[in-house]
Image: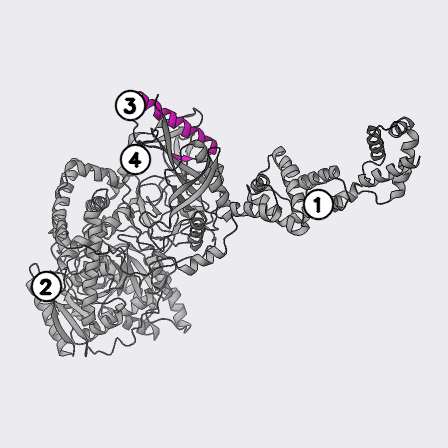
Amino acid sequence: MDLSTMTALEIGKEIKQRRLSSVEVTKNFIENIKNNDKTINAYTLVLEENALKQAEQIQKKIDNSEDLPPLAGVPAAVKDNICTKDILTCCGSKMLSNFKPPYSASAVERLEQAGAVILGKLNMDEFAMGGSTETSYFGPTKNPWDTQKVPGGSSGGSAAAVAADEAPYSLGSDTGGSIRQPCSFCGVSGIKPTYGSVSRYGLVAFASSLDQIGPIGRDIKDCAEILSVISGHDFRDFTSVNRPAIDFSSSFDGSAKSLKIGIPKNYFSAGLDKDVEKAVLEAAEVFKKIGAQIYEFELPTVEYAIPAYYIIACAEASSNLSRYDGVKYGYRSKNAENILDLFCSSRSEGFGMEVKRRIMLGSFVLSSGYYDAYYKKGLQARALIKKGFDEAFEKYDMILSPTAPTVAFKIGENISDPLKMYLGDIYTVSVNLAGIPAVSVPCGFDKEGMPIGLQLIGKAFSEPVLVKAAYAFQLNTDFHKKKAQAFKGGEQ
Amino acid sequence: MMNYETVCGLEVHVELSTKSKIFCGCTTEFGGEPNTHVCPVCSGMPGTLPMLNKSVVDYAIRVGLALNCDITRYNKFDRKNYFYPDLPKAYQISQLYLPICRDGKVEIETEAGKKYIGIHEIHMEEDAGKLVHDPWDDCTLIDYNRCGVPLLEIVSEPDFSSADEVIAYLEKLRDILIYLGVSDCKMQEGSMRADVNVSVKPFGSKELGTRTEMKNMNSFKAIHRAVNFETKRQIELLEEGKRVIQETRRWDENKDASFAMRSKENAQDYRYFPEPDLLPVEISDSWIRQIKENMPELPEAKRKRYVEEFSLSEYDASVITSAKELAFLFEQTTAICSKPKEVCNLIMGELMRLMSETSTLPEDLDISAEDTAKLIELVCDGKINRNTSKEVFEAMFKQKAKPEEYVKQKGLLMLDDDSLVEETIDKVINENPKSVEDYLGGKQKAFGFLVGQTMKALKGKANPQSVNRILKEKLEKL
Amino acid sequence: MKIDTELISYLEELSRLKLSEDEKNKAQSDLNRILDYIDKLAELDTADIEPLSHPFEFTNNFREDEAKPSADRELILKNAPEKKDGCFKVPKTVE
């Protein structure tokens, strides 16, 4: 069987019917990691021994004909800002390069309860701050479609691992587009769930009111299955929502009939790559063909999303990252004589420049004299952005847009220009500000063959409708089935 | 020299006696080996999140109602950001914008009379850990046991004009909090501590002077002295034509003086913002009603009731209500024996004497109301005399003796049998002819002597009324 | 809004960071470019708009007041760079 063409659910089915064993599947992916990751650098840690042990245990249960969930025995990998008990969780930072949390994130616990085999930890921008995985202390991850290019970020490792057959699916986290944009760059599918759907317990915080863990997979059906495993109320996260489990039972009829899809005209303006624009508009045509109604409309306040996002995200980050002071865990400078020195030197030596920049920006917008003009203003803009979405969803079931304004760019191209990097988040950040769900699925390729993603945005807790639309789209297209080839055959 | 008046305001921090911490399940118990009342949440590990303890909100509402505050219906938590090694997250979850209680008042009384002190606000927050200096390594060791213990910060208006008023307020506040059962208010353990700010201004002036602040004061005595010292220091500065600098000062109890802290520690920019990890708290009418219905009676109400219902004097009532334990003992004992005056006398007399003699604090009292009521019944029924009752009570206090058993064991019960009394009186009359003669000759004093001799012979176990009656009868018959 | 060198130093201090001269210059120019962009917000009319700090207006999530066993001290101290006598150890703090 060629595992590289199978979805996680298909692999799970084969394991369940004992045509494949969890151990051989796990070995297969570890083999792929060994072959491909020298080039790709998606993993910061491979848990070969652990994974094989887990696989054996699950296989025993399968052999005993225990009734297990659909993904039991299928391997997975986890972004390195998601805590794994007694296993390094470094967040792409020197600061936490030796940190082994004494607990697992709720999402990881739920995956393991559902029989997942954890292959390892995935590379990311430092503390999830970045859109290219270049700010990682462990070096950049390469795009499996073109290893000269970035995989996107911050969940670059999570998307690249799936695209390079190093994991059948993975978990990422999304604060301003960190799941969707790398999915778009790497030609895979992903969901940024409604805020509060997936517990944040054990997710190392970047911006607490924006962060969500979500799935990345080969198609949207896999992602829906993973999301139903990891979502649900958790008493350890007070912002986790107590509501019935997400019901995807009506999401896979393959129909987009009578879905009302809005396209915000003002998203298609300067800064949007022509090939991306073309692919996304063609995707809209596909939706039309399969029965959806397409409407153009104006989504106000788009241009304020990035300013509001960077104010709010950096403010929260500046506070969340204050705990890294060299006292309790993580990096401690050897050159400190007094406590102030210890704080300053540990933080200066332990954090990279992008993290420092955002901490300083966050400290600035909260500081005395600037709070009203920046932080408060940002929260007001956030209210208006949410209102804009609320009004749109009175008319449309979902909004269709590009996920990112461009395809993957060259490694090193944007890294010295933070503002340029931030502008790449134009279509994704407002979703986090409003707390609503969105999916990204492949919808084409540019002239050079780099994948393009389309984003579907829905109102809060409308994941089943988004998945229904994305599934219908994938039934009628094969962009998600195209395989990256560039990584094969070692370093180029 | 010009006349000045002092203006003080207080921020009192009170640790709540909930079972668990404000944001995790660790115990709030004082002490313990370092870092044994700690979990990933209260030690600020990455990825952990706060879980709000409902009782903290209950307690805060209770205190707010007792201090006549408006209860904020829509509450939020905010983060106060600052770096210090005792604060593991490098922010304290507190309330800045929407504190739970506002605009209250407390009545205090000093020699200068009664007055109201305004309560500006009360907010909920978490305590920090403890730093201990290690002289061996010349380093600092950190213990997070206290991290996350719930605190109320009770902020007064700058309504105090003397150190006496400050202390009267603190005592009143402590009484109320203890009665409410929300805190043990042990200053020596840091469960109650105060930041005191002081300024002076020319008498009658409307404009406030520049204030200085002294933080974390933890004894009434120190606070009293510090307020007086700071007042004097500031007046001296002004008289010399100098300025008072707004600053935080450290009170040195040994040197009995305050000292300026390094100016760097003064400049703080806490960058407060809404805590994103917690949801707002909405307090409904029914929630408040439920807390009102379960409010314990406060010292003031008790005092009034004792005067009206039990006819105690104002003074007695205020002494007994000065400590929750004394008031409870009084009420429970009275409920059993229905002799409030007797119970009051016993508490005001013997109990207070024994407590001061043995330095026993009210909260450490271990005297049962049942036993106390029993003792009072023994006295009132004439089974033991008042002197004996003191001995019995001391035994109850010191050895947890049971009054009836003790009286029996020690043979302290009064004689019911008049024949032994008659027999003894006959003997006394025979042995003291001189006194008998004196009495018959009209000297009343001699009667007392004969009663004394009789009681002595009976080892005090006779009922004095019987002895009086029988002796009189016998003497008249002579 | 322009961030000057003085403000950069203040932000360094607030953030407990210590930048080299080069880093400071770079931070200043980067932050100024970002702020230029962010200052776009000023043109947005936000009069009477209630600030939204959280995406959803859910309220009242509580934990009952029950004491649970704390973690093993070993686990709490496991990641500590330096420890002594069951405590985290740091250079002397000035008191």
Q: Dot 4, crowdedness within 10 Å: few (<14), some or many (≥20)?
A: some
**Disc 1 and disc 3: Cα gap in Å?**
65 Å
Q: Are marks 1 and 3 on the same chain?
A: yes
> How far is the residue under mark 2 from the one under mark 1?
90 Å
In the image, what residue type sits under mark 4?
A: Leu
Could you give the CA–CA distance between mark 4 and mark 2, rounded to whole angstroms? 49 Å
- Across and down, in percent, residue A419 comes to 13, 50
Q: Is residue A256 magenta?
A: no
Chain letter of the residue carrying label 3: B
Question: Is B227 or C89 nearer to us in this picture?
Answer: B227
Chain containing mark 2:
A
Judge if badges 2 and 1 mark residues of a common chain.
no
Q: Main secondary structure of the magenta part?
A: helix
Q: Which residues are magenta?
A: B210-239
Q: CA distance from mark 4 to mark 3?
A: 34 Å
| Total count of labels | 4
Residue at the spot of label 4: A340
Give the residue at mark 2.
A266
Residue B242 disc label: 3
User: Tag 2: residue type?
Assistant: Asn
